[in-house]
Amino acid sequence: MKKPMRVAVTGAAGQIGYSLLFRIASGEMLGKDQPVILQLLEIPDEKAQKALKGVMMEVDDCAFPLLAGMSAHSDANTAFKDVDVALLVGARPRGPGMERKDLLEANGAIFTVQGRALDAGASRNVKVLVVGNPANTNAYIAMKSAPSLDKSCFTAMLRLDHNRALSQLATKLGKPVASIEKMIVWGNHSPTMYPDIRFATVEGKPAKPMLNDDAWYKDTYIPTVGKRGAAIIEARGLSSAASAANAAIDHVRDWVLGSNGKWVTMGIASDGSYGIPQDVMYGFPCTTANGKFEMVKGLEIDDFSRERMNKTLAELEEERAGVAHLLK
Ligand code: NAX
């Protein structure tokens, strides 16, 4: 029997948490032979803690053979103690009348504290995935608040955007999702993201000539992928939850167990490649193996792509400037 891995989930009583915990405990994220211990963080609020207890009762009732332990927390320091994986899902949603600046401020307060707690107590190889929005900037704040951890411990979730991009293209071409490879979503998890199909292949052949419809690609596909989150809210009355949890599982599973050469999109700290300034948390194409990710480098950037990549970068730089005072 393998040694259990400790997995922290924040916002565990929320919508995404409700779709996520069961799949982690069933082995879908870390492997069907990997026992897990869940360390669940919620705000101290009585209602949230009670809701968390209820979710934990349901997890118990599944009698998952791989679940080696589970605990509830209201303090990030105890929740992140010795964790191997941390899924930072809980965040402050935008309230009525709240401006973008206020939202950044409120989340800055959460992610500085959580970054410091990871720095103090998590495994030195912890894999952190930030899902809570604004995900890229929250991941950046956490990373900057954890100076003793390597930058490569921190990632932001663009996998839902990546999966949406795959699914929309597969539907248009009438091909199975699994036949598409080398998809990329550059930049921020926001409507400015840039789904780039220039390198994508379908059944091993280039996707762009197969699509042969640049107008659809630019005027329909890119905005559809970028605004898919809003379309889900409009249809469901609630934001994406099961698909977001699914993407989180995909992201961490590939990071831990490897992508077998396939490209996946991860929000990672830039090393300066592709003209993206160092440390900006930006969606890049990556491959993963042996518990590490590696950026796919050397791809040609044409004028259209450069313009799109700069637009999403400008938004991230503005967010970064907006939280700089929190990181002094
Ligand atoms: P919910 O509002 O259902 O749940 C969030 C939970 O987090 C609540 O139970 C709340 O009490 C808790 N929470 C808030 N602050 C916390 C803190 N400091 N520590 C611990 N827990 C805290 O939201 P849900 O639908 O689950 O979404 C969670 C986050 O994911 C939101 O920020 C949302 O915007 C973001 N999303 C990110 C996506 C991505 O692709 N990166 C897609 C889906 C989703 O919209």
Image (tube, rainbow, N blue to C red):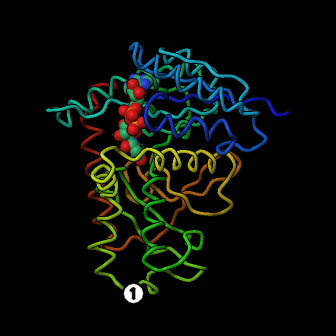
Give residue 203's position: percent from left, percent from top: 60, 79
**Residue at 26% across / 49% down in the picture?**
315
Q: Based on the displayed image, in which of its 4 quarters is residue 187 positioned?
A: bottom left
Which quarter of the figure is the N terminus placed in? top right
Helix, strand or loop status at disc 1:
loop
**Label 1 crowd (10 A; few <14 / some 14-19 / many >=20):** few
Amino acid found under the numbered disc labelled 1: Asn
The residue labelled by disc 1 is 212
In the rendered structure, the answer to whether residue 171 lies left or right of residue 249 reads left
**Residue at 46% across / 38% down in the picture?**
16
Residue 18 drawn above or below residue 228? above
Give residue 34's position: percent from left, percent from top: 75, 38
Give residue 85's position: percent from left, percent from top: 60, 33
Give the quadrant of ligand 1: top left
Q: Foreground: 205 or 281? A: 205
In the rendered structure, the answer to whether residue 319 lies left or right of residue 86 reads left
Q: Based on the displayed image, in which of its 4 quarters is residue 202 positioned?
A: bottom right
Q: Is residue 172 visible?
A: yes
